[in-house]
Image (cartoon, rainbow, N blue to C red):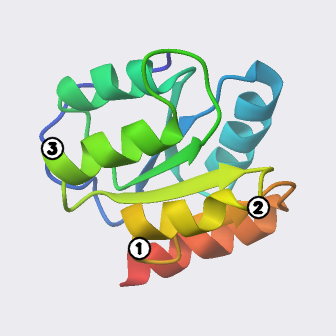
Amino acid sequence: MNAAGIESDEPASASQPTILVVEDEVLIRMAVSDYLRECGFRVVEAGSADEAVEVLKADTAVDIVFSDVNMPGSLDGFGLAQWIRRERPRLKVILTSGVSRKAKEAGDLCEESPFLDKPYHHGDLERHIRQLLAR
């Protein structure tokens, strides 16, 4: 886990939004995180939904959570999205999966363009994040 610091529950600054990347596959998480940093975002990494919950419970300021759906642990990406909806309802969530049938379930959890099919291009992810931040 790469915590970007302990801050309030309020969204991070508009000048450098913070993205929590939740992915159990280290190489994918590193590639996505590095790309988002190059795009000017602050990035906090978590290797599981359970780790992501701990980051959020520590009041790390996060603007958007980008999470894989299929992960080991007591929560998967859907469980994380449900926890966020209940505990941090203003926090935006983007889910991703290589299983396209997961899109409808993601739509039920995250109203604003919530799902990105794998494989996705990093540029598409960046555009998706910027659109959510602009809302």
The spot of residue 91 in percent (x, y) is 28, 57
Q: Residue at x 75, y 70 (%)?
A: 124
Task: Tell me if residue 8 can be seen.
Answer: yes
Q: Earlier in the sequence, mark 2 or mark 3?
A: 3
Amino acid at the residue labelled 3: Glu
Amino acid at the residue labelled 1: Leu
Q: Nearer the viewer, residue 50 or 43?
A: 50
Dot 1 alpha-carbon crowd within 10 angstroms: few under 14, some 14 to 19, many 20 or more: few
> Which of label 2 and label 1 is nearer to you?
2
Would you place residue 38 above or below residue 21 in this image? below
> Which of label 2 and label 3 is nearer to you?
2
The residue carrying mark 3 is 87
The residue carrying mark 1 is 133
The residue carrying mark 2 is 100
Q: Earlier in the sequence, mark 1 or mark 3?
A: 3
Would you place residue 82 above or below residue 44 in this image? below
The spot of residue 52 in percent (x, y) is 40, 28
Kindly indicate the quadrant of the structure image that contains residue 4. top left
The spot of residue 84 in percent (x, y) is 27, 46
29 sits to left or right of 92 = right
Q: Nearer the viewer, residue 29 or 3?
A: 29
Is the residue under label 3 in contact with that under label 2 (CB below 8 Å)? no
Distance, label 2 to label 1, CA atoms, is 25 Å
Kindly indicate the quadrant of the structure image that contains residue 132. bottom left
**Residue 45's disc number:** none
Q: Residue at x 51, y 32 (%)?
A: 76
Distance, label 1 to label 3, CA atoms, is 20 Å
69 sits to left or right of 14 = right
Q: Earlier in the sequence, mark 2 or mark 1?
A: 2
* SS at badge 1: helix
